[in-house]
Image (cartoon, grey):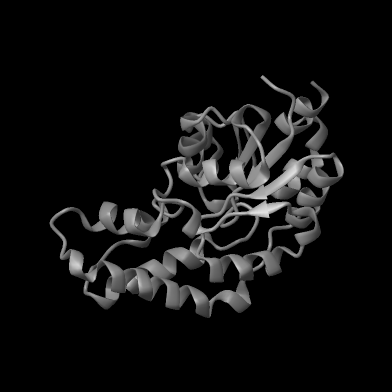
Amino acid sequence: MARLRGVLFDVDGTLVDSTYFHTLAWWHGFRRFGHDVRMNEIHRRVGMGGQKIVEHLLGPERDASEDQEILDTHAAVFSTFWPHLRAFDGARALLRQCKSAGLTVVLASSARQQDLEVLRAVIGADKAIDAATSSADAKESKPAPDILIAALEAGGLDASEVVFVGDAVWDVDAASAIGIPTVGLASGGYSAAELEDAGAVEVFPAPRELLDKFASSEIGRRLGG
């Protein structure tokens, strides 16, 4: 495996504590059209693209003419939570640590551009970020690897020389599809066991713990290799 040159980061649930806000926003979107979808079921799909969330939770027999309005409702409700978004402890410092180690840092986000701008402001580490993607950069959402392919292109990187940091099994699936190892963070609600079973090479509770063990992590080991 090539020496590490870059790190790709998921954002929602990985760097910013937003997963449960997304869950609630989706719940409102479904309820608007009378769909009684349990929040725990919604949470298990957060990390997928919006259209895939609707398809998986409502199924093929749904009235697909409602899809776009459900998506729009999710977006509108989520925007009301923008003032409450917070970066996880250690997230900002972790990005800066990667940058100071000489790594290219890319936010491999599939968030809408409007949301991404808010998320970046919440993180507050733009000087450590070399590139970022949004939903407009991928034809297929996770677990398809399109957004990671776009992130590699944005950072001028190859899959063999990066590590991906993400919080959902869909992140691990997407990265595995193109041969990128994933360092999992349990900060989005998936357990360490679930992330390891999906194929994460290691799992930390949250950004702070990864930062504290940076030198011995997959990132640190690859840097020294």
Left or right of 94 in this view: 152? left
Q: Quadrant of the C terminus?
A: top right
Splitting the image into 4 quarters, where does residue 7 fall?
top right
Give the image location of residue 148, x and y in percent. Answer: 54, 43
Q: Is residue 204 above or below residue 92?
A: above
Quadrant where the image shows the N terminus: top right
How many numbered marks, from 0 up?
0
The furthest residue to the right: 100
Q: Residue at x 40, y 50 (%)?
A: 139
As drawn, 94 above or below 54: above
Q: Position of residue 80 (x, y in %)?
A: 51, 80
- Residue 205 appears in the rendering: no
Residue 173, image x, y percentages: 46, 36
Along the line of sight, the residue nearer the viewer: 83 or 144: 144
Q: Nearer the viewer, residue 164 or 80?
A: 164
Residue at 28% x, 51% y: name it.
Answer: 56
Q: Residue 216 or 105: which is nearer the viewer?
A: 105
